[in-house]
Image (spheres, rainbow, N blue to C red):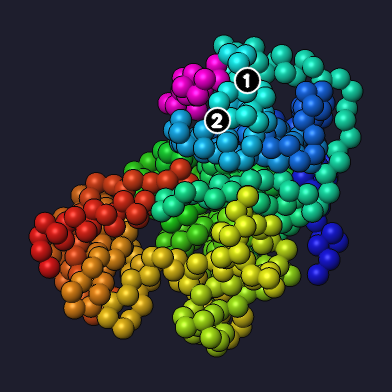
Amino acid sequence: MELRTACPLTVHEALDRAALLAPDVEAVVTADARITYGELAGEVVRIRSALAAHGIRRGDRVGLCLGNEPRWVALFLALGSLGALTVPLNTRWRTGEIRDALARSRVTTLFVADRVVRVDFVAMLRELGLDGENLPVPGLPDLERVVVLGEDSPDWPDFLARGGADVPPCAEPEDLLLVQYTSGTTARPKGVLLTHRSMCADAFFSGARLGLRPGDRFHSARPFFHVAGSTLSVLASIQHATTLVTMPRFEPAEALRLMEAERCTHFSGNDTIALMLLNHPDRARRKLWLRGAWVAASPAVLRRVIGELGAVECVAGYGLSEASPNVAQSCWWEDRELRASGAMRVEPGVEVRIRAPAGDRDCGPGEPGSILVRGWNVMRGYLDAPEQTAAVLDADGWLSTGDVGLLDETGRLHFTGRTKDIIRVGGENVAPAEVEDALHRHPGIRQAAVVGVPDDRLLEVPFAFVVLNEGAAVTEAELLAWARERMAGFKAPRYFRIVEGFERTASAKVRKDRLAARARELIGETGP
């Protein structure tokens, strides 16, 4: 498939088209900032000129440590158009994690906000020894420049003042665009290398299948330092001249307020975000204008999004950072129940195979196994990690995702769960997502998270942590009995624990590594 005929394949081509088609349409909206596509294009020209004047060139690696705001978007687009690589830094990282990412990615320039929500990054810079003109510093030999963006810092206006005449964009589709650090909840984060082609095409197809159109208003609080933000929010909006309504950190009451005030037609989220919106007490008093949504969630949650939030064109998606990220997605025009079931079309020009657990054959239709992906969306590799790259990406270009799923008779992909999360109960494999989907049908459960714990007889058994709806009066013993009546014996949780809430990653995923450790502690306290 020739992608160039389908969509722009560099970030500057995508922005130029949006600015030509819809110059007066708002590109990015936050609670305190707005910028149209025409204005954004002009800002990118200004920033690109300043970047070039400061010596930033093709192949340079530049760190962005900013919240979700127009300047992040403008810097990302300007850097990409010069052929430089953006290294997004997680704004929830602490000093040691930031130092590690800067050193490993050999960042030469760092743009950093003085503060994001409650995090003081100026104080972190002092801890790193980066608060003066003493660059480079020990441990960061490549870092030549730090630019602080904030009301009390002159760095940003001084940086821009160096710019002059416009510098033409020079990036090509195969140029690297992003060094995406993985979440790192179970291991040291790896730097995923993604290109203009992979991210721009992924964004285009995702937005088309979501049903984005020029002038639509797309709410997404997915952090820009994650590919669900940079690809599926920022670039998807640009590819379809859609307004991106965003916020520095997801908070359900503020999200509902923004969606009402900005008349958002779509939103993006995972199961946690969707459930927080669905179950928030403010939802009943907010008038929502939703038509669709992109949600990575179980069928039970998808049906609630469609039925209760009015997002009748809601679609499901599956992906991972190493695939830019989307591998498959349902389409807004498909049958509602088909979309709610989680059946997804593989992206055009992308191949998916399902490998049997023994690794000796491909699975037939309806048979679950390991998901393998090959195509234009697959990463170039991990940054400076050839052994780690070879462990997941073979010589023929097949990416081992570490996920479990199946292809049905029509070729649609059904995501079952992460391989590392699969619970092996006796001789059966149990996907936590399947158990969570069943538990979300209980009227008293707001959200469930299931992990495996050791068992002397069955090897592992499911342990369910649940957050109850406000006012729900149900005991752990009652939940245990309810589950046993509705699930096969090996799938039903052996243990329940009612909790107030879950610790989450910056992208709102439940920290299951922490839950698994707590579950092991609890069964040690109570005995088998």
Neighbor class of circle 2 (other Cα within 10 Å; few <14, some 14-19, many 20+) is few
Identified at 55% across, 20% down, the residue is: 130
Q: Is residue 75 magenta?
A: no
Label 1 and label 2: CA atoms lie apart by 11 Å
Does residue 372 appear to the left or right of 525 in the view shown? right
Magenta region: which residues? 116-131
Identified at 89% across, 23% down, the residue is: 165
Identified at 14% across, 66% down, the residue is: 478
Foreground of the two, 425 or 5: 425
Q: Quadrant of the C terminus?
A: bottom left
Q: Residue furthest left?
A: 526
Neighbor class of circle 1 (other Cα within 10 Å; few <14, some 14-19, many 20+) is some
State the image coordinates of residue 16 (x, y, percent, origin top left): 83, 41
Foreground of the two, 451 or 455: 455
Residue 180, can we see it?
yes
Asked if 420 appears above or below 351 in the picture, the reply is above
Q: Quadrant of the N terminus?
A: bottom right
Q: What's the amino acid at mark 2?
A: Gly
Residue 135 disc label: 1
Residue 30, can we see it?
no
Q: Which residue is mark 2?
A: 139
Secondary structure at numbered mark 1: loop
Identified at 66% across, 23% down, the residue is: 145
Asked if 283 appears above or below 92 in the picture, the reply is below
Secondary structure at numbered mark 2: loop
Q: For residue 481, which quarter of the picture?
A: bottom left
Q: What's the amino acid at mark 1?
A: Leu
Asked if 408 appears above or below 298 in the picture, the reply is below
